[in-house]
Image (cartoon, rainbow, N blue to C red):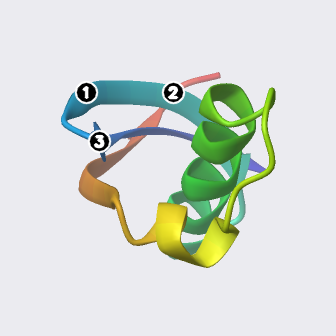
């Protein structure tokens, strides 16, 4: 798997993480899931509504 750095915003906060995925599109999807896990772990949420609050700004391949 390749490693990507995905950056974006969630509820107005700049966020960015490294994600291992097979391509940049899958990396963006994995980014959204990981951001929701990190920020919404303590309370039940409507995942669909929260996912709409994520904006992907960029996906770059990085060396692992």
Residue 55 pos. (x, y %): 27, 58
Residue at the image point whose x is 68% and y is 54% from the top: 33
Residue at the image point whose x is 70% and y is 56% from the top: 45
In the foreground, 36 or 59: 36
Q: Of callouts 2 and 3, which one flags the residue occurring earlier in the amino acid sequence?
A: 3
Q: Which residue does the numbered mark 3 point to in the structure image? A: 11
The local crowd at label 2, few if under 14, some if 14 to 19, many if 20 or more residues have their Cα within 10 Å, is few
Left or right of 5? Residue 2 is right
Q: Which residue does the numbered mark 2 point to in the structure image? A: 17
Residue at the image point whose x is 24% and y is 26% from the top: 14
In the foreground, 10 or 57: 10
Residue at the image point whose x is 40% and y is 28% from the top: 16
| Quarter occupied by residue 64 | top right
Which element is circle 1 on?
strand
Which element is circle 2 on?
strand
Depth check, mark 1 against mark 2: the one in front is 1
> Vertical placement of 10 versus 22: above or below?
above
Q: CA distance from mark 2 to mark 3?
A: 16 Å
Q: Which residue does the numbered mark 1 point to in the structure image? A: 13
Residue 4 appears in the rendering:
yes
């Amino acid at each position: 798997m390749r490693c990507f750095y995905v950056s974006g915003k969630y509820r107005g906060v700049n966020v960015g993480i490294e994600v291992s995925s097979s391509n940049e599109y899958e990396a963006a999807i994995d980014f959204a899931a990981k951001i929701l896990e990190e920020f919404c772990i303590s309370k039940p949420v409507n995942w669909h509504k929260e996912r709409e609050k994520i904006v992907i700004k960029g996906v770059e391949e990085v060396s692992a």
